[in-house]
Image (cartoon, coloured by chain):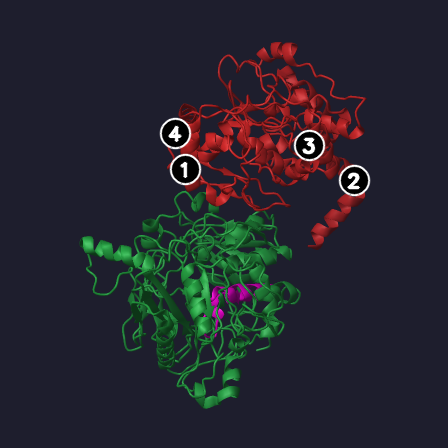
Chain colours: A green, B red
Amino acid sequence: MARVLPKRDAVIIGLGWTGSILAQQLTDAGLNVVALERGPWRDTATDFNIAYMQDELRYAIRKDLFLKPSVEAMTMRNNAGQTALPMRDYGSFLPGDGVGGAGVHWNGQTWRFWDSDFSIKTHLTQRYGAAKIKGLQLQDWGVTWDEIEHSFDQYEYICGTSGKAGNIKGQIQPGGNPFESPRSRDYPNPPLRMPYASTLFAEKMRELGHHPFPLPSSNLSRAYVNPLGIRMGECTFCGFCERFACGNYSKASAQTTILPVLMKKPNFELRTDSEVLKVNLTQDGKMARSVTFLDAQGVEYEQPADVVAVCAYALMNVRMMLLSKIGTQYDPVSGKGTVGRNYCYQTSAGARLMFDDKHFNPFIGAGALGQTIDDFQGDGFDHSKLDFVGGAGISCTVSNGRPISNRPTVPGSPRWGAKWKQATVDGYQNSMGFGSQGSSYPVRENYLDLDPTYTDRHGRPLLRITFDFPDNDVRMSHYMSEQLEKLTKPFNAKYTAVARLQKGWNSVPYQSTHNTGGAIMGTDPTTSAVNKYLQSWDVPNVFVVGASAFAHNAGMNPTGTVGALAYWAAEAITTKYIKSPGALVPA
Amino acid sequence: MSKTLWAAVFVALSVPALAATTDAGKYQVILGDCEGCHGKDLAGGVVLETPFGRMVAPNITPDKETGIGNYTAQEFNLAMKRGVAPGGKRLYPAMPYPYYAHMPDSDVSAMWDYLRSVKAVKNRVNVNQLRFPFNLRVLMRGWNALFFRPQPIADASKSAEWNRGSYLVNGPGHCGACHAPKNAFGADKRALTGTSLQGWFAPDLTSEHHAGLGSWSRVDMVEYLETGRNAHSLASGPMAEAVENSTSRMTMADLDAMAVYLKDVPPSKGNGGGASGIDAQMKAGARAYELSCVACHGRDGKGSALFPPLAGNAAVRQVRADTVVRTVLAGAKAVATPKAPTGPGMPSFGWRLTDEQVANILTYVRNNWGNQAPAISPETVKRIRSELHSSS
């Protein structure tokens, strides 16, 4: 029998970015909140000790900060005709673990999806006609740009994002991204200083007539005090960002932006090492009454609450809904059901250039340090004569020169011995790259459900991912590879290689931890799991917050939009829901 | 909801006088930093390491069995101001009754009212864990005869603010309990010139310019006491607790009064001046500083809005190196206050820096950018490292 704890106003599942944002906003509104975090407590000075954080073997290779498959694995397959098998090691993507979640080890690229993303179906249909998007399950998100712009602003100012506005209230700003949707004001901090490779990239792109700009970075360009009064440090370009936590207080994370204030609040409690098994519903299934969780000793507790906020990683949010029977499982055959629908990923390609006489000094790096062109992003360019929709940001970032994984050599070089060593020496200073990070659009056959065979350590079914790159996205990515070929020309590199995406997603090599969808927001309860406020259509005191709500994925890193959605949902709860509990949008 | 509301209204209507004195009493608890030793819930249990052995602060909640629920107001007053508990039991001056002796009876009485109102917690504390013969309370009679002589702290020639500041610093604030050197019997000697305790060095608070706070303005002092940080320094260790529990919750008028008084404390003899003949240490220290310290504290030692400066930081320039050495070896966590909530941490470098490297870095830091302080030897680092190991 579970021990029943005193009822709270709200229980939050997972204390990463979205959980921390919701906890902060809900407690500010006076609610009594408890957060349940499966992983351990993590704090900058003690757990991200700058004296040993640069241990590449421990953090980047052995993945010390990531979710272990023994805690939660997933099964994966490319299509419904295959039998999905569980991962023994996470590869293609790396979910986070512990307080701060994936926001601890992210790179800090802080993009805003575009106005045309939030109303993508309407936009593309109006511009090209319905036939253009046939076969794609594109849907409007329900929220509009004008409604959510201030939530992006809120998130950027919490993070101290460093960048250059390209469009302030419709006025194009020199040096910024002219394609971005209008923003109410500039970033809180100026862009980071640029390394040589990114500077060279920007020069060449400008010569080609494109529009390079410093990519928006939550690695801070200067010391900053955020609106909560929390101080952050200036990024030191240490080159240990992605897969690492920041020991310098200069990469935005829950730890560096929210937790110092949140953890002191008398109306907030955090329980770490507490794994939520499911959300418990009332008998009629119309309301959530509590969540069941296990503590580190395996003792089972029941935590009653008026509001349940599911704030785990996107994929875990979907699994939590399925395990708790909130909403109905999506069926790719009939196209009916909502939970598991519109799972998307990221569709990327890259170019590598090698020279004889450069000194790129790649060790001067940061997670989100570089220049981007959005000339081929989203629907920023005309697709009427093209055989696809969607696009990609093309960025030259310099994230690291770490000794184990960053040893580029010219193809054909020996793979070992003295000559290999010499080739890595030559390649280290002479190599640069840039890549396209492309959109991922939903199709009927890509989806998430519970695996019929494999279970976790508590006997619960694992999540099953059925995914392959849709033909539209493959065509888009091949188009980007062609653009990359053209973009490499003016560099006159000694050696150039451009990758082309292959059909047949491989779950082993690392690609991207930008898994989206599965509990998507929308206007129609038959095609979306949550409404425009991220509130479950089926169980209105459940809010499901994160990239799980993305109705598709754009060619940008998702965290900026995840943060904005979290502020957006929190605002709906604190200004609308607690005044009048119930469905915020009539079904 | 409504039940609670009615209860609140009832309380407000029926006992306004008591509410006022418990508020006033709560402020006295803040001024006296009672939570610092007796814990957030005042139920005791905080361990004090003294040269005479361990002491554990007792439970002062109204619990009758394990707290002070059986005290009378008069008995409480005697304990606060004379160090005598019911039954004639002598308190040790770890309970700073020589300071509290300056408090007017009305404030002690308000404190008593407040302590009667807090939640009673059952928590039995084994207070006296001192070594023989110090564990014999009867010895305290002799100690009191020798050292318990409350000196006048008022000065009619000074301003009202100065006098309030003197009262707060030398009375309930008991700053000297940490910052005044002790004699062999644990009694305070010269006031506020700094001393080692519990593995830290409580710094010189006088107006001396190298080890003391001579370069701090009145505004700097208030900012530090209120927020735990200012342009010169950042509170950590035992001072972090004092700021969190006490000074950050004081009124601005009281903080300003303390600043006025502290600015007027005559300078100490300083730290003995800079080191000489340390070229090799300075050179090696500069190299090691570049590798391990520059990212946060800066090449110019000026720190940043987040990390404290080392240039001009009095904590760095104390005559004894306890605080700086332990901070490098074991790390430290800065205080977090409502006005400065970040509470950044200094990570531990003990595992990767040798005694010699630590000594070199700190000698360099203590004698660079205008800092002047005695050199630190590897032997000193070794001693502090072994003390840290034995205390953890």
Subunit that carries the residue with mark 4: B
Residue at the spot 58% in from the left edge and 24% down from the top edge: B194
Q: Is residue A21 visible?
A: yes
In this rendering, is residue B335 above or below B172? below
Labels 2 and 4: the sequence-earlier one: 2
| Gap between marks 1 and 4 measured at Cα | 13 Å
Label 2 sits on residue = B15
Q: Earlier in the sequence, mark 2 or mark 1?
A: 2
State the image quarter where residue B11 is shown: top right
Is B378 within the magenta?
A: no
The residue indicated by pointer 3 is B31
Q: Earlier in the sequence, mark 4 or mark 3?
A: 3
Image coords of residue B74 (percent x, y)? 73, 22
Mark positioned earlier in the residue sequence (1 or 4): 1
Same chain? Circles 4 and 3: yes
Q: Position of residue A377 (x, y in %)?
A: 46, 75
